[in-house]
Amino acid sequence: MFQKILIANRGEIALRVLRACKELGIQTVVVHSTADSDAMHVRLADESVCIGPPPSRESYLNIHQIVAACEITGADAVHPGYGFLSENAKFADILAAHNITFIGPSGDHIRVMGDKIEAKRTAKRLGIPVVPGSDGAISEEKEAKRVAAEIGYPVIIKASAGGGGRGMKVAHTEADLEVALQTARSEAGAAFGDDAVYIEKYLQKPRHIEVQVFGDGAGRGVHFGERDCSLQRRHQKVWEEANSPALNAEERSRIGGICAKAIADLGYSGAGTIEFLYENGEFYFIEMNTRLQVEHPVTEAITGIDLVHEQIRVASGGGLSVRQEDIKFNGHAIECRINAEDARTFTPSPGTITHFHTPGGLGIRVDSGVYSGYKIPPYYDSLIGKLIVHGRNRVECMMRLRRALDEFVVDGIKTTLPLFRDLVGNPDIANGDYDIHWLEKYLAKGE
Ligand code: ADP
């Protein structure tokens, strides 16, 4: 087992990883920018190293500084959290070259899945159902028209290097295609430094369903069931549930089994998430994330298994603590992402939190790095915490969520809490009857 883990992240996820390390008796080092000297993860860690000024590229994305912090403190492993360097193959390779373990998959697996065209090809080869579309990158309009006519309109043009819901353009007819192709390519080039785009069928009423998988790196793969992340705004997740209200046990075990086998065949190591769109009883692979997800706690709530413990065990060579048959799904869990944003306009609302009171009681978990008097720096993501609620079934979970939201107090800044208070009272949400477009339509109606 590792002696000392360096956590290369900030906010609630840095604290989340720190808690797992403490439970396992592992020393912790955190790195932070000058804007985060007062952050909770810095206060709670055994050691901390300031690695640069507030802009992420000079601190949390600065590989040399992070490697130097490992050398100075003698850390033998790095947990990257999510975002920042968590899916950076070069970072994983550089750490390996310094004999420091990257808590995640190999650089090669990150590389394959980071390129969406290559990821889709790999998924297909591994027997995972994919969205119909082009076989590779498309640059010519003529070719785009041929593929679109074959799969049928509407189609979506996506950046191969895309992420965070950016770089996607929908074309409803052949007349839209040329502009969509040009805009997608130039936006992809500007945002990701790579203008490769591909085409796939645009599904009109799908749900976003993702399967949590783990590989032990030695040819064994397991799945931890699925999460439903259909409630999205601008292709970004807002509310997540496990299990999906749309799947039955047979579908769960079928898609889970396909994913676990693929992970085993790939020789994958660590945590991963295989993302699908789900429509009319069919699953369509869209991408794989090679890291821990923001929404992992809903899976932990229904399985009772600490996924960060598993990541650390696997990376240290100790293997997984569970076999597939040990993983049982118990009840229902929902996570709400609480952002420092206006609940209607979603404009960021940094500033000082004058009062912070979190709900408690059976089935409630709050993962957050903020506290009363904490000043939210304007430089980073606006996520300030996550409320995760567990119940014996979805009805009990929703009852508990409603009262937990009533108890939650965040004063001094605007947050997205009022949105969730509206959502728990909505009949479609109560019935679990929503697709990936539901939230955008709901928000548009309210304006
Ligand atoms: P990113 O890596 O940027 O998050 P994804 O490929 O995971 O991109 O897609 C993000 C979201 O975009 C999906 O959850 C879904 O809402 C929407 N989306 C992506 N592909 C399609 C598609 N073929 N049809 C309809 N919606 C899509």
Image (spheres, rainbow, N blue to C red):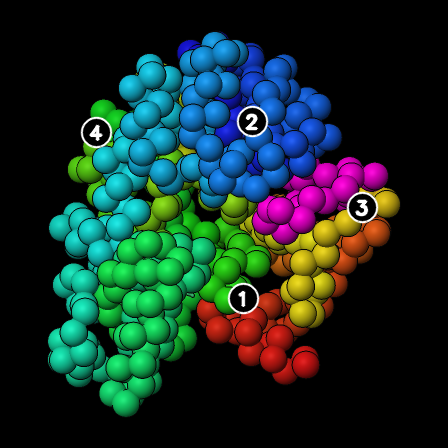
Disc 2 C-beta below 8 A from ligand 1: no
The residue beneath circle 1 is 233
* CA neighbours of label 1 inside 10 A, class few (<14), some (14 to 19), many (20+): some
Disc nearer the start of the sequence (3/1): 1
Residue 51 numbered tag: 2
Count residues near mark 2 (Cα–Cα under 10 Å), then give few for <14, some for 14-19, many for 20+: many
Cα distance, mark 4 to mark 2?
37 Å
- Main SS type for the magenta part? loop
- Residue 408 visible here: no
Q: Magenta residues? A: 358-385
Q: Residue at label 3?
A: 352
Please state which of the two labelled residues, at mark 3 or mark 4, is closer to the viewer: 3
Do the numbered discs 4 and 2 sit on residues whose CB atoms are within 8 Å?
Answer: no
Q: Amino acid at mark 1?
A: Arg
Magenta-span inclusion, residue 286: no
- SS of the residue under disc 4: loop
**In the rendered view, does 143 fall on the left or right side of 280?**
left
Q: Separation of disc 4 and disc 1 at Cα?
A: 37 Å
The residue under the point 33% across, 67% down is: 186
Disc 1 on helix, strand or loop?
strand
